[in-house]
Amino acid sequence: MYKENLNIESVVEEPLGLFPNDVGIKPFLKWAGGKTQLLSHLHKYAPIAFNKYIEPFIGGGAMFFSLNAENSIISDSNEELVITYQQIQSNVDQVISHLRTFRNEEEFYYEIRQLNPIDLELSFRAARLIYLNKTCFNGLYRVNKKGHFNVPYGKGNGNFLHEEVLQNANEFLQNTIIQLGDYLTVLNQRAEPGDFVFLDPPYYPVGKHSDFKRYTKEFFYHEDQVRLKEEFDRLVNLGCYVLLTNSDHEVILDLYSEYEIKIIETKRMISSNAKTRTGKDIIVIGHND
Ligand SMILES: C[S@@+](CC[C@H](N)C(=O)[O-])C[C@H]1O[C@@H](n2cnc3c(N)ncnc32)[C@H](O)[C@@H]1O
């Protein structure tokens, strides 16, 4: 059993599923564990003023795009994902012109999927990831032991090329540092007092169908959650304002029991036949004042 936590508050609300109207920048990828539904809550607990914004498990970047911070650092350990952000930042026209030659057909999907990314030119590599993300089953990112993307074709997916979304993202990314790496390395290098750090790690798995650990070929184990908590403490002591999301699991509630925790009900979009299944996310809030 987890320790009793007087700081836990449960918030039950219909998910909005919408971005704030006045921002209008959309993520260009649909990433497992995307935070779109939690945005209104995350904004509520975000600091009003901060130096720079750091998001070291960027995934689809829903919070990053909605926050519109002046000065940001985003990173991830998934090389394909980071190359894609970098190419959207510096080479968006080339990425778009590759995507224009692609077709949403099953046979073509498997041709693109079987290409080895390291043999490809970087803008083609980014186009490949965007295409696979938009046309694969449920927008999942999953690789086998050798690191090869192995999600099947998703029948019924529509358009995979949204030029305006990509061009907007290109503009938005101009003042952003985009880095490949483990979150600990990035935070050790970059975090300073006054920064706002948003941590959205692979969630602690809940239930037997949970697939949230399989983002990269390196899994996120129990020990990783414990190390992440130590890093959370370090950041708070350093003087950062830290928000963390995770699953509503007693291991996580126990780990963060000294902090303020909000429990939020959301609809799970990731599993195949359960678009209306509800789940719970938690938001942990850490700051020194
Ligand atoms: C839950 S997803 C992030 C979802 C994202 N914030 C969004 O709103 O769509 C977790 C991300 O962490 C990345 N990741 C997993 N282990 C990591 C590590 N040790 N260091 C950095 N990134 C890691 C995965 O590649 C994945 O993109």
Image: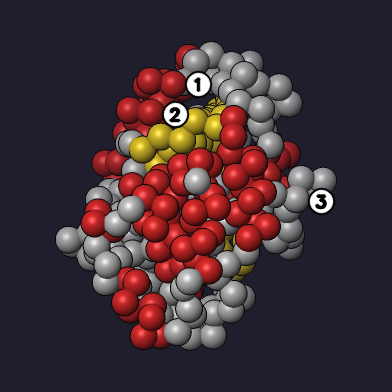
Q: Nearer the viewer, mark 1 or mark 3?
A: 3
Real-space Cα distance between discs 3 and 2? 31 Å
Q: Residue furthest left?
A: 146
Helix, strand, or loop for circle 2? helix
**Please, what is the three-letter code of the amino acid marked with disc 1?**
Val
Q: Is the residue at mark 3 in contact range of ligand 1, meaning its CB lies under 8 Å from it?
A: no
Q: Nearer the viewer, mark 3 or mark 2?
A: 3
Task: Please rate how many residues cluster around mark 2, counting C-alpha atoms within 10 Å: few if below 14, some from 14 to 19, many from 20.
Answer: many
Secondary structure type for disc 3: loop
Chain-order first, disc 1 or disc 3: 3
Residue 69 screen position, x and y as percent: 66, 31
**Which residue is tagged 2?**
232
Q: Label for residue 139?
A: none
Q: Is residue 135 above or below residue 91?
A: below
Residue 7 is at least partly visible in this image: yes
Inspect the image, locate mark 2, and give the three-letter code of the amino acid beneath it. Phe
Q: Quadrant of the C terminus?
A: top right
Under tag 1, what secondary structure? helix
* Mark 3, residue position: 21
Residue 114, given in percent of the width and then of the height, sits at 26, 71
Badge 1 vs badge 2, beta-carbon distance below 8 Å = yes
Judge whether 216 appears above or below 41 on screen.
below
The answer to whether 33 appears left or right of 209 in the picture is right
Q: Give me the C-alpha separation between circle 1 and circle 2.
A: 6 Å
Residue 98 lies, with reference to residue 181, above or below; the image says below
Q: Could you classify mark 3 by the number of other residues whose Cα lies within 10 Å: few (under 14), some (14-19), or many (20 or more)?
A: few
Tell me, for residue 236, which label it has, or none. 1
Question: Nearer the N terminus, badge 3 or badge 2?
Answer: 3
Q: Describe residue 86's horizontal placement relative to residue 168 as left or right.
A: left
Res. 42 visible in picture: no
